[in-house]
Image (tube, grey):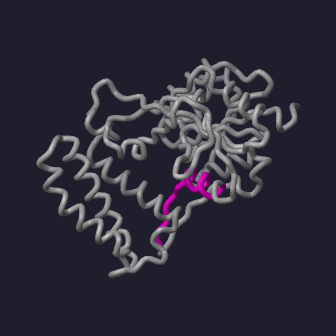
Amino acid sequence: MPADNAILSVIICTMNRPRLLRQTLARLSACRRPVNHELEILLIDNACNRRTRELTEDFRDLPLRYIEEPRLGKFNALNHAVNRARGDCLVFLDDDILPHYDLFCVYEEAFDRHPEIHLFGGRIELALPESHDADLVNLPHARLVLAQSNFGSIERLLNYPEMPAGPNMAARRSGLGAEMFFEPIGQDGLSVELEDTTFFKRNMNKGQPVLYLPQARVGHVVRDEQLTLNYFQKRYADCVFAQKVMDDDDQHSMRLLNVPCHLLRTLALNALTYPIGYTGSRSAKLTACVNISATWQLISRYLQTK
């Protein structure tokens, strides 16, 4: 059996998405295998779904380990996976990605070439349906909402708030110790499962550098139900709230009815600029709608916990 540092452990958490998962596993089957590392792929089923288990039988060419995690929550699945992985080099992918042919080898080479680096992130490009709303996809909010990660074509260290995204990231277990574990965080009775973003922010705060690998590429499959204004409004509000919790922005802010006053000012400003945006281009209308909805949803969260 190879030593831990000669095993590349690929971790995929899934929950009731067999169609997307099948597509991802098929693409992984076609990927070039690592040269100097044994490959293992851990599939963590966060719903213990019979269809997911049966699906694995179609991919016996992959070094696939099926693991059930009945406790719902991606952070539970991630923690279980990290504990069960045999390798020191861990690659985290989602169940709705289309990996590039050389993905495993790019990560393997980066782990070997940079023993001083313990955190890595790759490029995530959107795999959009043929018919999609181009105005919506081109909004500045789309990067957060659709988990797009592209920091250019040059390998470099990232500077916060630049961070890799969950569908395509990697970590060296031996360099992180207890900080390897994922957990939800929250404040004022409000909690949010941030998984990957919490993990990176916590480690970056401790001085851990993160290396961006533009050649570690995956496509992120965007579903039709994600390309709606309602989805953008809710998801963007979740992303903004997550960022505030991570940055601890609101803990010491002045409040009115438990709502941070700066959020009330933002709502008022959005309300004033909303008519201007709504009389402009369609992109301006969409931007105004997403901004004012996200701010109101954030305020509602605080009102519910007063």
**Quarter containing the N terminus:** top right
Above or below, comparing residue 262 to residue 282 in the picture: below
Query: Residue drawn 79% across and 33% down?
Result: 7
Query: Residue drawn 19% across and 47% down?
Result: 285
Q: Position of residue 24 (x, y in %)?
A: 53, 28
In this view of the protein, can residue 76 be seen by the observer?
Answer: no
Q: Position of residue 60 (x, y in %)?
A: 66, 23
Q: Position of residue 146 (x, y in %)?
A: 41, 41
Q: Residue 301 vs residue 114: left or right? A: left
Q: Residue 241 vs residue 72: left or right? A: left
**Foreground residue among 4 and 204:** 204
In this view of the protein, can residue 146 be seen by the observer?
Answer: yes
Say if the magenta span includes residue 56.
no
The magenta region covers: 189-203
Residue 267, by quadrant, is bottom left
Q: Residue 109 vs residue 16: left or right? A: right
